[in-house]
């Protein structure tokens, strides 16, 4: 991690996005070093809930035994298995035996959808999450994840398209909360022009973030280019200044919305 770049981002973020929560980053490794490891548990827990402490500034390393949700296991790359009758779980369920989430109309649609989801194996024993300001020189972050409200999202979305002629410089694919911040942006690292992923549309994950929060997960190379573009983009205009002036209202820069903090578990 380039410490000069780190300070550049912090300075520019505080100036252009005053009062907005700092992003968190992750990287895979076989050696988590001195980072606290999430303990193994048999209790089911949504992985998004465990990120609340990271967003507050505490680095955490997760291994396979610390992630109990089957979706979290799969989309963090710790398992290739799907739960039994997954196509029914994600759609209409099985009467008297399995309640369906009804995110897809039919089991057949689920099966077709899953054919388009490539297998993913974690490239390390641990996935380490750190808030941006506590990244160290030896860290090599792979994705930067913002938890933001609509005004800040508008800024990130527009900044992502600043250096692109494409009408879709970002993507918002269907997927679980954890897939939208880990699996999908990580897969974008293989692309010649990696796209940030807008997410946290997963209804099951929504209770673990504030009501006005979505995520913007930028693959590291794209994030770096966005930071370098900040001072020549729309962020220096009077148009953005009108939005910028209200960004600090109701936000806690160390993690979460003051108006709905209790919804972050």
Image (cartoon, grey):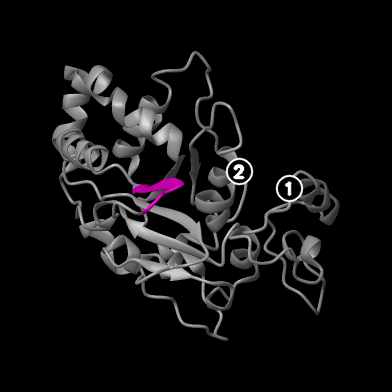
Q: Is residue 102 left or right of residue 162?
A: right
Quadrant the C terminus occupies: bottom left
Q: Residue furthest right?
A: 108
- Residue 246 occupies which quadrant of the picture? top left
* Callout 1 crowding tier (Cα within 10 Å): few <14, some 14–19, many ≥20: few
Query: Residue at 38% of width from left, 28% of height from top?
Result: 225
**Contact check, label 1 and label 2, Cβ < 8 Å:** yes
Query: Residue at 41% of width from left, 18% of height from top?
Result: 163
Q: Is residue 211 left or right of residue 113?
A: left
> Which x, y percent locates residue 216?
42, 43
- Give the residue pinned by disc 2: 187
The residues colored magenta run 139-147
Q: Is residue 74 left or right of residue 18?
A: right
Say whether disc 1 or disc 2 marks the residue closer to the N-terminus.
1
Q: Secondary structure at mark 1?
A: loop
Q: Image height check: is 161 above or below 107?
A: above
> Which x, y percent locates residue 193?
54, 26
Q: Secondary structure at mark 2?
A: helix
Q: Image height check: is 249 above or below 135?
A: above
Q: Image height check: is 80 above or below 245?
A: below
Q: Residue furthest bottom?
A: 42
> Which x, y percent locates residue 217?
45, 44
Q: Image height check: is 74 above or below 248?
A: below
Q: Residue 189's mark?
A: none
Magenta stretch: includes residue 144: yes
User: Who is closer to the viewer here, 193 or 87?
Assistant: 193
- Give the residue pinned by disc 1: 118
User: Who is closer to the viewer here, 124 or 82?
Assistant: 124
């Amino acid at each position: 991690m380039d410490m000069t770049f780190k300070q550049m981002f912090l300075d520019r973020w505080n100036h252009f996005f005053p009062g907005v929560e700092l992003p968190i980053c992750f990287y895979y490794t076989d050696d988590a070093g001195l980072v606290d490891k999430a303990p193994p548990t048999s209790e089911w827990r949504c992985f998004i809930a465990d990120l609340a402490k990271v967003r507050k500034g505490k680095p955490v390393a997760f291994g396979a035994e610390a992630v109990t949700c089957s979706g979290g296991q799969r989309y963090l790359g710790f398992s290739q298995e799907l739960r039994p009758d997954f196509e029914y779980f994600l759609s209409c369920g099985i009467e008297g035996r399995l309640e369906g989430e009804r995110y897809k109309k039919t089991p057949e649609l689920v099966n077709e959808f899953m054919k388009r989801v490539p297998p993913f194996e974690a490239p390390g024993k641990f996935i380490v999450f750190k808030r941006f300001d506590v990244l160290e020189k030896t860290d090599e972050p792979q994705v930067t994840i913002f938890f933001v409200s609509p005004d800040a999202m508008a800024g990130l979305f527009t900044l992502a398209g600043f250096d692109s002629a494409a009408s879709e410089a970002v993507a918002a694919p269907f997927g679980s909360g954890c897939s939208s911040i880990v699996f999908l942006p990580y897969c974008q690292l293989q692309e010649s022009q990696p796209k940030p992923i807008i997410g946290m549309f997963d209804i099951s994950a929504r209770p673990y973030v504030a009501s006005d929060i979505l995520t913007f997960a930028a693959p590291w190379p794209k994030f770096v280019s966005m930071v370098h573009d900040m001072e020549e983009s729309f962020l220096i205009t009077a148009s953005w200044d009108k939005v910028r002036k209200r960004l600090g209202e109701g936000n806690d820069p160390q993690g979460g919305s003051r108006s709905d903090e209790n919804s972050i578990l």
